[in-house]
């Protein structure tokens, strides 16, 4: 790879770093796809045909593309729920749990006030979802701010508790007459409106607005500056009069609220019903996306998009080559592995 | 409630708790060397599916257990490469490993869904044979159950009574100092992850080959995360892990007892007990937690120039 690098250097590109980054990421993706191709070959499937299917089904048609966006939407929110607290070095591994609590609270709204018109019910459910998520995040946030327990541990533990609470309500009170592991379908007034005649729902708009807001707040406001200060040196920030504890708790709660919104959008928009164990790792995926994107809003959108293409392609492979649905996680993981391993084939940059 | 039903519940608790104890012991070794392995769920799934597949093909459960163990060790080596050699973030790498495990185990297990296997043979205790059949059948355990508590003691001995364990714990506290004292932190961490993986594999083997004796996708159902919780609960101590595993299986047993005696409490609420207790214990320790958790847990060792 060295001659290529020198050639690029000699040609006098101004944005040397950008070119390097793009080439690096393309190379990483190729590597991940090669690795998964080997796995496909071993299990007796045709990798080239599979990849053709993945790309033609996701990027080749308007419908396929819209399905990618549908998968991407909750990931944007869950990644943001990690990225925001990460700015003040809070490690929120608990998005999975916050998402469940958001879904749980929102479902309560949908079932208890099902008669209300959509114009009132949907905003109410959004509010409830955000409250549910932020309450679940308040516990670790408070314990961390008071210096009692590290938030990584508590968020991780609470992750396992939240789905059980959801199951408790579904099995105990809410389940539909036919099926014990889900609620009855929500009334139409409890559903998030969809856009462009596709399954894309309004939460995409929320996600994009919140990501923009996140970028603006971090760049242009006093809050952003103070958060940077806390992220840089909490001790110094505290001595300069920044209310660090208040920030720790409130930012954690806002992160939880965003995760709760994602949960609300899943039950109200995507499913239209609350299923036990519906998430299947959306929260954890959000953590990975935020981490890979370095917490930057644009990076979150790009990374979520790539990951959604892979997940969406996996849905198709299940149908066409009879691959177990979960198998696409292997391709996903290979992509994550190569990015995490940061192979330094092109840029011999000094590691910090 | 009869003695028989109580004993039955107890024996089923022991069956479900064994895999948890092995996995927790593995995670204790990982974390004592300073590495949080969040991918445990994935490691267990791959081990369980590989062990099950080999058992189904060869009809030899012991061979299946062996393959499970090795699979666990190898899965942890992936994590090792990422977090030790490539200095990647431990939490993110662990979660990536978890997703890898979801996928790979589904691929391995796809042709074995619904397959029946001859599970790990039961070895009756010598003294029990003259008890009534009804009772002795309850305490007819397999080899891995008998080995679980001795294994916890062995891990404790390895960690606290050997030079290897001293070095391992030292890396978990402060890798730079360990390096200065002439040990190789990277090598020690690789060893810790490998041994930890072997134990997680053993736990997974007991789950699929001895306990459930079938393969279903995502059969571990959160056991990997329970193990991570138990590590914290047991203060990174293998002997306390026995208590932790008993607590969890006790909650399961308690639930079955309540059901058999007709008291209606949602099993889901009872399932949350181990987590809630762990959180309460953490809060109760408060500031003192610092003295028990390995000091450089989760930190990347940048290496010495």
Image (cartoon, coloured by chain):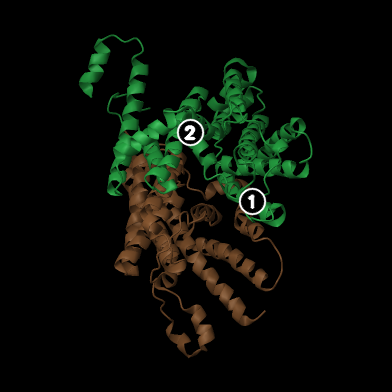
Labels 1 and 2: the sequence-earlier one: 1
Label 1 CA crowd tier, 10 Å (few <14, some 14–19, many 20+): many
What secondary structure is marked by label 2? helix
With B33 as the anchor, is A9 left or right in this view? left
Residue A289's disc number: 2
Residue A271's disc number: none
With B230 as the anchor, is A120 left or right in this view? right
**Chain at tag 2:** A
Instruction: Give x and y (percent) for residue A330.
Output: 38, 43
Identify the residue at image location x=67%, y=32%: A250
Q: Which of marks 1 and 2 is in front?
A: 1
Furthest residue in direction left, as rendered: A3
Q: Is residue B13 above or below residue B105?
A: below
Identify the residue at image location x=51%, y=52%: B225
With A19 as the anchor, is A98 left or right in this view? right
Is residue B34 at least partly visible in the picture?
no
Contact (Cβ within 8 Å) of mark 1 with mark 2: no
Is residue B287 at least partly visible in the picture?
yes
What secondary structure is marked by label 1? loop
Label 2 CA crowd tier, 10 Å (few <14, some 14–19, many 20+): many
Residue highlighted by disc 1: A182
Q: Which chain is assigned green? A: A
B132, A209: nearer the viewer: A209
**Chain at tag 1:** A
Q: How many labels does the image show?
A: 2
Q: Quadrant of residue A120?
A: top right
Q: Which chain is assigned brown? A: B
Furthest residue in direction bottom, as rendered: B130
With A225 as the anchor, is B231 left or right in this view? left
Q: Is residue B58 above or below residue A49?
A: below
Instruction: Give x and y (percent) for residue A149.
Output: 60, 44
């Amino acid at each position: 790879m060295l001659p290529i690098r020198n050639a690029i250097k000699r040609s006098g590109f101004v944005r040397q770093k950008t070119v390097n980054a793009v080439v690096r990421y393309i190379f990483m993706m190729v590597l991940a796809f090669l690795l998964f191709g080997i796995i496909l070959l071993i299990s007796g499937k045709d990798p080239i045909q599979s990849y053709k299917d993945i790309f033609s089904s996701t990027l080749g048609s308007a419908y396929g593309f819209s399905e990618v966006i549908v998968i991407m939407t909750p990931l944007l929110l869950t990644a943001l729920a990690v990225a925001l607290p990460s700015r003040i070095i809070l490690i929120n591994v608990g998005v999975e749990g916050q998402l469940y609590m958001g879904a749980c609270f929102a479902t309560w709204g949908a079932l208890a006030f099902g008669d209300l018109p959509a114009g009132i019910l949907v905003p109410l459910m959004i509010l409830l979802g955000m409250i549910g998520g932020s309450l679940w995040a308040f516990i670790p946030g408070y314990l961390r701010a008071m210096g009692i327990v590290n938030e990584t541990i508590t968020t991780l533990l609470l992750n396992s508790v939240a789905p059980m609470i959801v199951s408790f309500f579904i099995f105990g009170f809410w389940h539909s007459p036919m099926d014990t592991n889900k609620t009855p379908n929500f009334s139409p007034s409890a559903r998030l409106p969809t856009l462009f005649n596709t399954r894309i729902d309004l939460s995409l708009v929320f996600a994009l607005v919140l990501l923009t807001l996140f970028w603006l707040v971090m760049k242009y406001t006093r809050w952003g500056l103070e958060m940077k200060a806390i992220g840089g040196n909490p001790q110094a920030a505290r001595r300069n009069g920044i209310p660090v504890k208040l920030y720790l708790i409130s930012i954690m709660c806002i992160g939880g609220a965003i995760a709760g919104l994602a949960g609300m959008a899943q039950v109200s928009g995507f499913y239209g019903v609350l299923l036990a164990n519906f998430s299947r790792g959306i929260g954890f995926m959000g953590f990975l996306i935020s981490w890979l994107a370095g917490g930057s809003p644009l990076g979150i959108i790009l990374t979520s998009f790539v990951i959604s293409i892979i997940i969406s392609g996996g849905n198709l492979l299940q149908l066409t080559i009879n691959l177990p649905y979960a198998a696409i996680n292997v391709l996903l993981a290979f992509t994550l592995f190569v990015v995490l391993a940061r192979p330094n084939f092109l840029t011999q940059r000094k590691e910090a | 409630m009869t003695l028989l039903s109580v004993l039955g519940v107890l024996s089923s608790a022991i069956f479900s708790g064994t895999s948890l104890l092995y996995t927790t012991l593995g995670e204790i070794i990982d974390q004592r060397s300073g590495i949080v392995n969040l991918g445990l769920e994935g490691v267990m799934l791959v081990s369980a599916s590989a062990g099950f597949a080999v058992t189904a093909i060869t009809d030899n459960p012991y061979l299946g257990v062996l393959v499970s163990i090795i699979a666990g060790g190898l899965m942890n080596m992936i994590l090792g490469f990422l977090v030790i050699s490539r200095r990647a973030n431990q939490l993110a790498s662990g979660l990536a490993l978890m997703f890898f495990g979801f996928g790979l185990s589904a691929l391995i297990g796809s042709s074995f869904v619904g397959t029946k296997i001859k599970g790990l043979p039961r070895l009756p205790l010598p003294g029990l044979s003259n008890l009534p059949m009804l009772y002795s059948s309850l305490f007819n355990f397999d080899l891995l159950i008998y080995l679980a508590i001795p294994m916890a003691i062995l891990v404790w001995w390895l960690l606290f009574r050997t030079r290897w364990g001293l070095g391992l714990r030292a890396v978990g506290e402060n890798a730079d100092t360990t390096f200065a004292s002439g040990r190789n932190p990277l090598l020690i961490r690789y060893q810790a992850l490998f041994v930890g993986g072997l134990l997680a594999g053993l736990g997974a083997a007991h789950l699929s080959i001895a306990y459930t004796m079938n393969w279903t996708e995502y059969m571990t159902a959160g056991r990997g995360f329970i193990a991570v919780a138990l590590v914290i609960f047991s203060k990174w101590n293998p002997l306390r892990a026995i208590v932790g595993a008993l607590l969890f299986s006790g909650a399961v047993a308690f639930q079955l007892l309540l059901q058999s005696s007709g008291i209606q409490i949602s099993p889901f609420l009872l399932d949350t007990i181990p987590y809630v207790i762990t959180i309460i214990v953490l809060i109760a320790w408060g500031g003192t937690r610092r003295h028990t958790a390995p000091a450089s847990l989760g930190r990347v060792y940048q290496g010495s120039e």
